Amino acid sequence: MRLSVRILTASVLALTLAAGPALAQDARTVREAAQLRDRALQDNVAYALVSELTTRFGPRLAGSESEQASARWGADKFRAMGFDNVSIEEFPLALWTRGQARVEIVSPFPQPLEVVSLGGSSATPAEGIEGEAAIFETYQQLLDQPEGSLTGKIAVVLQDTVQAQDGRGYGATSPIRGNGPTEAARRGAVGYVLRSLGTHDHRFAHTGATRVGEGTVPSFAMSPPDADQLRRMVRFTDQPVRMRLFSSAGFTGQSVSQNVIGEVRGSGAPEEVIVIGGHLDSWDLGTGAIDDGAGVAITAAALKLIEEMPRKPRRTIRVVWWGSEEVSQPAPSQGLAGARFYASSRAAEMANHVAISESDFGAGPIYSLALPAGAADTDFRRAAEAVLTPLGVLFDGAPATGGGPDTGPTVALGVPAFRLNQDGTDYFDTHHTADDVLDRIDPEAMDQNVAAWAAFLWLLANSDVDFRALRPAQ
């Protein structure tokens, strides 16, 4: 990685500077962006940040004391890194706790399954729930069942998640977890079990949020090998499979979560704000290293490099460590509580938000850049491409319609998004599991992320590109 960057830097930068007047940035800005890129590959604080975060605080379930303590630590880090206008913005949260979960096959082949409760799921009665399993190979098969057809049964969906570099396999199966318990309840089911939304074959289960509130049932995810075991059971017998479920999960009271905010204030157009970040909360099985300790560390490290530059960026760059991205909330919020709070509390300021994006896909290397619609044929894009190409980052011609989950509420208010797309081929091997720990992060790949973020942000902050003006007429 570093060798290829050194070889390509001189030639690419020479071509970039030769085109100086045609670029959205002057030659000095492009040269500084390349310098930031190369500095990040040699030295940045990202790995140290995620290492300290995951070691000091472990899992950071939304609304927990651990998440709150990590936010105070994050604000102290922002101040130590020289960021401006550091703040912790609290918002109310219903606190969900996991409790205990057990699922077992009662007959015809008695045995336990490796499971976890889905986030936001309710508890079973103290004696548990027992019933015949209605087993479906695909989610669509469940949806095809008429209302009342699963009365008294436990709905089970075995559909696999397809591995993909951009995570689209997870996008296709996530409704099985988010909406599945509600759809099962609508058809009369008393419980719900799905194959974990993971792309590995190890015997641990993935958690993740599901819809909460009335009209749902206690819900669980089982490990992929246990889903395969159920498949074999169905082939080996004509008898119905009976299951017993137990969970003590549920909402236990009110708490608070928070967004941690810092920025490097612009020197020429400080009112124009670029928003970056990741989410500080995590699930409670691992230590939240790839989801999303990596993302908060990558974006803060990139901004720290910019803070150290001899001159300030023209525009303000704001880093947000969003709270409560993971756990669903009771209606009407449902999810993304921190992101919703950020957007709603700044609704009057959205006209000054230039762009938004987050890092929330682990620490795999960035392989492409996606810009808002209309930005493909611009000098700004050509400048960004020239600086990022030595990192192995290609330009993605498909427009960015979002910058990650926490950017959604802000994008909905009209703020353009960009994406630095990471290679997520193996991301869902450990996502939302007990194996989401620091050892899953490759420090060199993390350096490449910081390099791409720092260089791109420097170009964007020192340009006058207006992504809103580039949008095609609606």
Image (cartoon, rainbow, N blue to C red):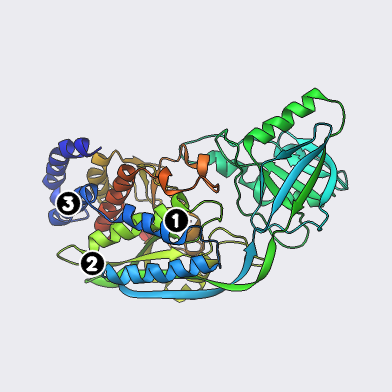
Residue that lies at the very extreme toward the top in this rendered image? 236
Q: CA distance from mark 2 to mark 1?
A: 28 Å
Helix, strand or loop under label 1 = loop
Question: Badge 2: how crowded within 10 Å, few (<14), some, or many (20+)?
Answer: many
Label at residue 21: none
Secondary element under disc 2, as helix, strand or loop, is: loop
Q: Is residue 284 above or below residue 397?
A: below
Residue 307 % position (x, y): 23, 65
Q: Nearer the viewer, mark 2 or mark 1?
A: 2
132 w.r.t. 307: above or below: above
Across and down, in percent, residue 257 comes to 53, 70
Mark toward the start of the polypeptide (2 vs 3)? 3
Dot placed on the residue nearer the N-terminal end, 1 or 3: 3
Q: Amino acid at mark 3?
A: Gln
**Can residue 14 be seen from the camera position used here?**
yes
Q: Which of 379 and 404 lies nearest the eye of the viewer?
A: 404
What amino acid type is highlighted by mark number 2?
Arg
Specify the quadrant that holds the N terminus.
top left
Tell me if residue 151 comes above or below residue 268 in the rendering.
Answer: above
Residue 363 screen position, x and y as percent: 39, 46
State left or right for residue 218 relative to residue 65.
right
Q: Which residue is mark 3?
A: 35
User: Which quadrant holds residue 332?
Assistant: bottom right
Q: Where does residue 194 sit, x and y in percent of width and height?
A: 69, 42
Which residue corresponds to mark 1? 473
- What residue sits 46% from the left and 69% below the top? 69
Give the residue pinned by disc 2.
314
Residue flagged by tag 1: what amino acid is it?
A: Ala
Q: Is residue 159 left or right of residue 434?
A: right
Cα separation between marks 2 and 3 = 17 Å
Q: Are marks 2 and 1 in contact (CB under 8 Å)?
A: no
